[in-house]
């Protein structure tokens, strides 16, 4: 019976893929986890709603530092809100995120949170804690997440006197801008559901001049130095080259800043933002809702930049993560979420069968 259920439900998953226009690669990954047979969406909905006690799980068994985990609370019936924190092996919180509702199959709500893992995190066993708000109160959940080590490149950047002063000299306006941007990138709007698919490259000409997570040493003109971590991807391109929205979303910010120059921030999901820095010009306005591939500006060298390039960044729950990963996979992988829930159901049925045999 377990096999029949699992085999039938994967075809339902395939139907859901077609309905939600998920990628073929995601479907192949899901098919490897089971077999297929005829079924319908109503059956899938019924099975997904079977789980009597809510469970907190992650789609990924482990996550590299600098990546994002997808945290799933199922079933999501009656949930009004969810907040998730990630604690390191010493019990210190290193990131947090708020959840939102998605529908991996029609009319079946699942609550998820996209949680960023800092690229400075040490590898090891971490703890995920979630608090879910229901109509009759709150409930606490916990699960484990393994963080894997990743190596990053190191590079040195020589700064001119003007660039040295721009980066080093205290400036109240620069501090204010940094605080406001941090507040924006850590904010959540439950109605900020604009795009669930994969990214497209934001520029056509995209020689990489710096990668995500690069460890940088800034050499100042007077011989001093400072270290920093590069939290985006730099794409060298000629000035004036069009810059496009990597995904659909709302323009959450479009203005000039001291360090990042002409800058645009797009909101794609609650707590998920992409950033486009050092533009030569901005061609959108705050509040606009854009389709994927809409032009948002042109490549430039404004702000703290040594040459024309686009700095492209992705923030998840305020944490910078590698945007390249979402050129290969959707922001919300409904097939993977569906398959994860099937694994929960199968494990539950296996436990019931084992207990029956022991009895």
Image (cartoon, rainbow, N blue to C red):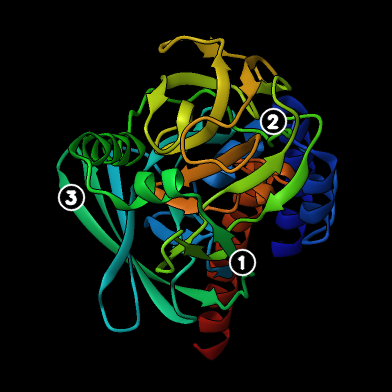
Label 2: which secondary element? loop
Q: From mark 2 to mark 1, how far is it between C-alphas?
A: 24 Å
Residue drawn at point x = 21 percent, y = 36 percent:
176
Q: Position of residue 220 (x, y in %)?
A: 44, 60
Which of discs 2 and 1 lies nearer the camera? The answer is: 1
Position of 180 with respect to 242 (left or right) is left
Q: Is residue 97 above or below residue 57?
A: above
- On the image, the x and y values in percent for residue 105 come to 61, 34
Q: Which residue is mark 3?
A: 138
Residue marked by disc 1 = 155
Q: Is residue 358 above or below residue 43?
A: below
Q: Give the spatial CA distance, label 3 vs label 1.
A: 47 Å
- Name the disc covering residue 202, or none: 2
Expressed as whole percent of the image width and height from the top left, the position of residue 141 reads 30, 63
> Which quadrant holds the N terminus?
bottom right
Q: Secondary structure at mark 1?
A: strand
- Which structural element holds mark 3? strand
Q: Earlier in the sequence, mark 2 or mark 1?
A: 1
Residue at x 47%, y 27% (from the top left corner):
263
In the depicted view, which residue is nearer to us: 355 or 255? Answer: 255
The residue mark sitting in front, 2 or 3, is 2
Label 3: how many Cα within 10 Å (few below 14, some 14–19, many 20+)? few
Q: Residue at x 56, y 16 (%)?
A: 281
């Amino acid at each position: 019976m377990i096999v029949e259920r699992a085999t039938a439900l994967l075809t339902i998953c395939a139907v859901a893929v077609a309905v939600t226009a998920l990628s073929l690669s995601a479907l192949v990954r899901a098919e490897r986890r089971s077999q297929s047979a005829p079924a319908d969406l109503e059956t899938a909905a019924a099975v997904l709603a079977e789980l009597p006690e809510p469970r907190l799980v992650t789609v990924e068994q482990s996550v590299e530092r600098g990546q994002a985990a997808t945290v799933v609370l199922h079933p999501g019936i009656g949930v009004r809100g969810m907040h998730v924190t990630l604690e390191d092996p010493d019990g210190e919180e290193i990131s947090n995120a708020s959840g939102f509702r998605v529908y991996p199959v029609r009319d079946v709500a699942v609550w998820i949170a996209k949680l960023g893992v800092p690229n400075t995190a040490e590898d090891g066993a971490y703890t995920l804690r979630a608090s879910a708000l229901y109509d009759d109160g709150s409930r606490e959940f916990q699960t484990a997440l393994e963080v894997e080590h990743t190596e990053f490149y190191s590079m040195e950047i020589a700064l001119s006197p003007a660039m040295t002063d721009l980066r080093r000299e205290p400036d109240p306006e620069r501090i204010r801008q940094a605080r406001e941007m941090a507040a924006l990138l850590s904010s959540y709007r439950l109605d900020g559901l604009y795009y669930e698919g994969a990214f497209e490259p934001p520029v056509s000409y995209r020689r990489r001049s710096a990668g995500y997570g690069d460890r940088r040493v800034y050499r100042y003109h007077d011989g001093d130095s400072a270290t920093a971590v590069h939290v985006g991807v730099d794409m060298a391109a000629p000035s004036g080259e069009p810059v496009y929205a990597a995904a659909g979303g709302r323009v959450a910010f479009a203005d000039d800043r001291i360090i990042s120059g002409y800058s645009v921030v797009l909101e794609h999901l609650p707590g998920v933002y992409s950033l486009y820095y050092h533009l030569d010009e901005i061609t959108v306005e705050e509040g606009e809702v854009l389709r994927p591939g809409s032009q948002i500006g042109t490549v430039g060298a404004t702000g703290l930049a040594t040459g024309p390039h686009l700095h492209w960044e992705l923030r998840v729950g305020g944490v910078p993560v590698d945007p390249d990963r979402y050129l290969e996979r959707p922001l919300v992988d409904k097939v993977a979420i569906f398959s994860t829930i099937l694994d929960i159901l199968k494990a539950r049925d296996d436990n019931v069968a084992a207990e029956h045999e022991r009895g």
